[in-house]
Image (cartoon, rainbow, N blue to C red):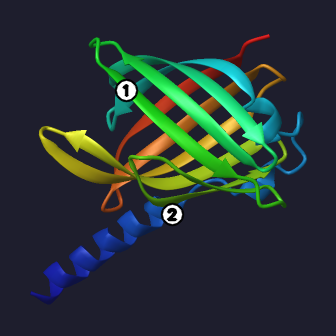
Amino acid sequence: MQRRWVLSAAAASALAATGCAGPSLDEYAAEKPALDLRDYFNGVIDAWGVFTDRSGKVVKRFTVVMHCHWQGDEGVLDEDFVYSDGTTQKRIWTLKHLGEGKYPGTAGDVVGQASGRTRGNAFNWRYTMALPVDGKVWEMQFDDWMYLMNDRVMLNKASMRKWGIFLGEVTLSFTKRA
């Protein structure tokens, strides 16, 4: 019995350690070009993405058209998704710039409030999203990383977890219209 407990504790510790591992936002502080969400997410942005499961298999492809605008320190990202299976989805994010690169945000399918920060060319966005899966709604945690490549292109990689278990990734490429 004690051996089983020790093995269970070791497995839980390993799972917890891998769930917290990842880059630090401070590692990107000197990276250029510097990302200002109010500048980049202003206007129309096109995005192309994939969702991959935990084995890396592409499960779904999608495109997004985003209509973004800011009034002072408050921004709206109005997203229209079209998935490879023909389904569509709309998400409207409301963001607020608090200074020092801090951006909380909300959306209709986000549980509570998202928390985001920028440093250098990077943005780290963490939130819990209520997603429909097989007729049920699951609350999934997202650790979302965006990297500004130039004034028009940004890359995005988000890992999804439930109960600390890695479920898959969303990878996106954003292009700001000229």
Residue at 51% x, 63% y is: 20
Q: Dot 2, crowdedness within 10 Å: few (<14), some or many (≥20)? A: few
In the rendering, at what x and y percent does residue 11 appear? 29, 69
Q: Which residue is mark 1?
A: 89
**Viewer-proximal residue among 176 and 80:** 80
Image quadrant where residue 172 sits: top right
Instruction: Pick whichever of labels 1 and 2 is earlier in the sequence.
Output: 2
Q: Which residue is mark 2?
A: 20
Helix, strand, or loop for circle 2?
Answer: helix
Residue at 77% x, 42% y is: 71
Quarter of the figure that contains the N terminus: bottom left
State the CA–CA distance, disc 1 to disc 2. 30 Å
- The answer to whether marks 1 and 2 mark residues whose Cβ atoms lie closer than 8 Å is no
Compared to residue 82, the image places residue 78 above or below, namely: below
**Viewer-proximal residue among 6 and 24:** 24
**Viewer-proximal residue among 153 and 107:** 107
